[in-house]
Amino acid sequence: MSVRAIGAPRSQQSAETTQWFECNEATHCRPRLHSSPYNKGAMVAATAYEPVIGLEVHVQLQTKSKMFCGCSAAYAGAEPNTHVCPVCMALPGVLPVINRQAVEYAFMAGLALNCEIPEASKFDRKNYPYPDLVKGYQISQYDRPFNVNGWIDIDVDGETRRIGITRAHLEEDTAKLTHKRERGSLRSLVDLNRAGVPLLEIVSEPDIRSPAEGRAYLQKLRLTVQTLGVSTGNMEEGAMRCDVNVSLRPVGTERFGTKVEVKNLNSARSVQRALEYEMIRQAEVLERGERVAQETRGWDDDRGITVSQRSKEDAHDYRYFPEPDLPPIFVGREWVDELRARLPELPDARRERYMRDFGLSHYDAVQLTSSLGTSTYFESVIARYANPKIVANWIQGELFRVARSLNVEVEGTRVTPDHLAELLTLVDDGTVSQAMAKGILEEVAQSGQPPKALIAERGLAQISDTSELDRAVAEAIAANPQAAADYKAGKTSAMGFLTGQVMKATRGKANPGVVNDLLKRQLDRI
Amino acid sequence: MALHELTIHESLAELRAGNISSVELTDAYLERIAQVDPQVQAYLTVTADRARADAHRADEARARGEEAPLLGVPIALKDIFCTTGIETTCASRILKGFVPPYDATVVAKLAEAGAVLLGKTNMDEFAMGSSTENSAFMATHNPWDLDRVPGGSSGGSAAAVAAGLAAAALGTDTGGSIRQPAALCGVVGIKPTYGRVSRYGVIAFASSLDQVGPFARNVADCALMLRTISGQDPFDSTSLPEPVPDYAARLDGDLHGMRIGIPDEYFVAGMEPGVETAVRRAIDTLVELGAEVGAVSLPHSQYALATYYLIAPAEASANLARYDSVKYGYRAPHVKSVEDSYMRSRGEGFGTEVKRRIRLGTYALSSGYYDAYYLKAQKVRTLIKADFDAAFQRFDALVAPTSPSVAFPLGARTQDPLTMYLSDVCTLPPSLAGLPALSMPCGLSDGLPVGLQIIGPALGEETILRVAAAYERASDWRPTIPAIG
């Protein structure tokens, strides 16, 4: 199988071709490419070129009402066309009115992304005909967006990189189209519930240099808007959507190559996969001595390929002009200062605080602040159990493992912060051993039962009572005279064996520390 | 005097005195419509049942001792205003059968003021035109001469008021669509300051220019109507917050010390001599009334027409994009795809002039042309506004002709859009500057009414209405309903 088949019509594709680009959450794709015996050319091509990547991310803002009317913006699960009014249905004669909350959310996001907020901004009309665009134009922002010249830092493979943000502007979402075949003819249905929901479009500079960075950038944006509380950031539900621009240039050169836009990326994973795919595809084109066509391509997640949708020649002329129905917006410094004061602790600051106040390593702090759910979880636990390092280890070790096995986030497991804090307290007071606690955590994840109740129900409490254990220790020594003799002869490893025998006899419930003490005491008496 | 000849103030006096009921008054208008409108064709829809119900409610309210500024007064609305449950077409085939589920803000305000709705009047399709001949459904005839146009685009409203088919009516003015038909039909019409009246529920033509205003038979009625519909609207972000004065109560005062400018550029080449004579005579009257009259130059006025025909079509090209056959309105039969439906539904649904302006506007906004056309037009617009700012440093109001000609024969200009566009040459500059301007009758030329235009500074409605009222008192013009046919 040669790499030239990549991007060929489905009929010519083998399963093997798409296999190359399958990634799972834990592994990056590139090592797989290298491991394939068939893609040597692609590997050379991919290493000879450097990708130049920029992302355009649309974030639905979590406002009560829509961008320009009073309809509820919380349409998830609603019957089609129930969150509508004359304004968002674009009836003749209606006018938009700006949602102040949406503007404030846009500014808060801009501040969190280190943007400048120009004193004067305005809305513009972006004109294009499509049935999901009820007015025939979208109210957006063209040359005077709310936020400009920002940046965020991302961490990839232990390295921090700063990605520029060109702009973050406010616009309105479109309606949702559903296409279905009915009695032989294709019908398209329009649901206007989403039409007019506020969207923040965040455009990055072409500063991203690898698919993994693209993914990290998107995750950082999501974390930021979630932390701000301005969006759910839920990509599966479409609350966050992403288009990428990617071009290749020979390593060591400055000039940008021809860029290709890839649309329809619905997860951080698909961003990474699509970028990896495009890198190979474009490298192939260049290696053949051909030119990369400037075009828009769509990501097909099932097939793991991008498909050409529109060439540059078909590109829209959006005929932007200032929206005459809305006055320009002048932003006073006081307003910006007030919004800045309202910002919650942002991910970078939180990471620094974890390192400073809790003595966590940079790596641990990055891990614990990588999602809002994890950091919220972490802080809930340490409010009840005041040893942050132990909590950090448990979350990153056991809890991450349990969550991964159940394919959920940490906060999605049945282990609540209360449960974890309780369990760690039980370890400390000797009720259960460290090893038992790990097992109990898994059981809690299964049943959702609090650790204490679970331990009582199963009789799992550790035996630390010396009178009870004295007997078991005496029995173990009696039953294993050779081991006792070995210990007396100076072979300390015999102690481990004897401890194991006591643990076995007590079905693991004995407190190993106490057993050790008792063994020593009894053996010394012999 | 027949009931339909009464002004609003006269009608209100009779109603309040209990001499007549609103039902009687309304029936008189409905009868008059039945009699005369077949010749004038001012109405696209007559809402007789609604009118009688409104009138009945008004009479009941008055019987309970309630009062309202227009309680029981029958009025008409240009078919550009959305009215709940009443077909609203903008005189376009593309909106034939469209029944809005909501009221325009001005419609709600009139209802609250107790007005009785007689019906929806004819207009140029989407308010694009100066003769009402661009209606998809019919032409309206000038009550003064049925072979002539009533002007446009609010020709139906102007003709209805002129012919005694409504006590007053609302129109819209984008580049002269209230003032020019008011002039040609011999009634008073005012286009207020941009933002004075809410545009919510008014079907958009050119959003940065559109304004709502009333037609009435005299200045006092016009002032009363204007006060009723004015004011800030939370549903229109471009509406102005300034309080609304009681215009009708401040019409007295003489013109002593009033400084009135006469812009040279408005006495254009090709102006009909009869129009110029009537306007000059009116200016003489203003001088007699004590006004200090002087010449003023508005040098950028000559670019107003070109500027207007870039900005207005550009905005229209976007405003009319929603008529895409998907949600409401006309859909061509047997369409094969959404593109096919766009092309054919819009191709068949819009009239020639509307399509011409959509093309013009689309072109003016296109990549590579935007700077040369739309952007440049916006800059010239700023210069036109600056001319007025300078003029209003020296003058309280400006006086000029409304239209260079009296009503022209039906069909005379339909083949020549440029000549038709020139009908608005005197009304376009104040529109571009967002200023208030009114037109009132100042005599006849060849038996046809001539319009006098009075232009004020921003929010200067009170001033221009006072000038108009003083002139009205001094002139020999009296509200006249011409004999029809």
Image (cartoon, coloured by chain):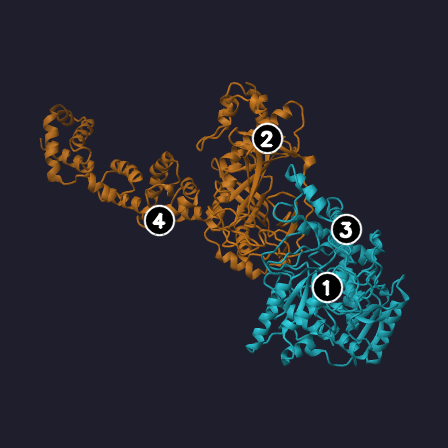
Chain letter belonging to callout 3: B
Residue A113 lies, with reference to residue A299, above or below; the image says below
Report the amino acid beneath label 3.
Glu
Q: Do labels 2 and 4 share a chain?
A: yes
In what element is the residue under mark 3? Answer: helix
User: Where is mark 1, residue-wise?
Assistant: B157
User: Where is mark 2, residue-wise?
Assistant: A307
Residue A467 lies, with reference to residue B27, above or below; the image says above
Q: Do labels 4 and 3 share a chain?
A: no
Asked if labels 1 and 3 touch by Cβ distance under 8 angstroms, the answer is no
**Label 1, label 4: how far apart the Cα atoms are:** 70 Å
Mark 1 neighbour density, 10 Å: few (under 14) some (14–19) many (20 or more): many
**Label 2, label 1: how far apart the Cα atoms are:** 57 Å
Residue B415 lies, with reference to residue B34, above or below; the image says above
User: Where is mark 4, residue-wise?
Assistant: A380
Chain letter belonging to callout 1: B
User: Where is mark 3, residue-wise?
Assistant: B353
In what element is the residue under mark 4? Answer: helix
Q: Where is residue A193 in the image (x, y as percent from the top left)?
A: 53, 48
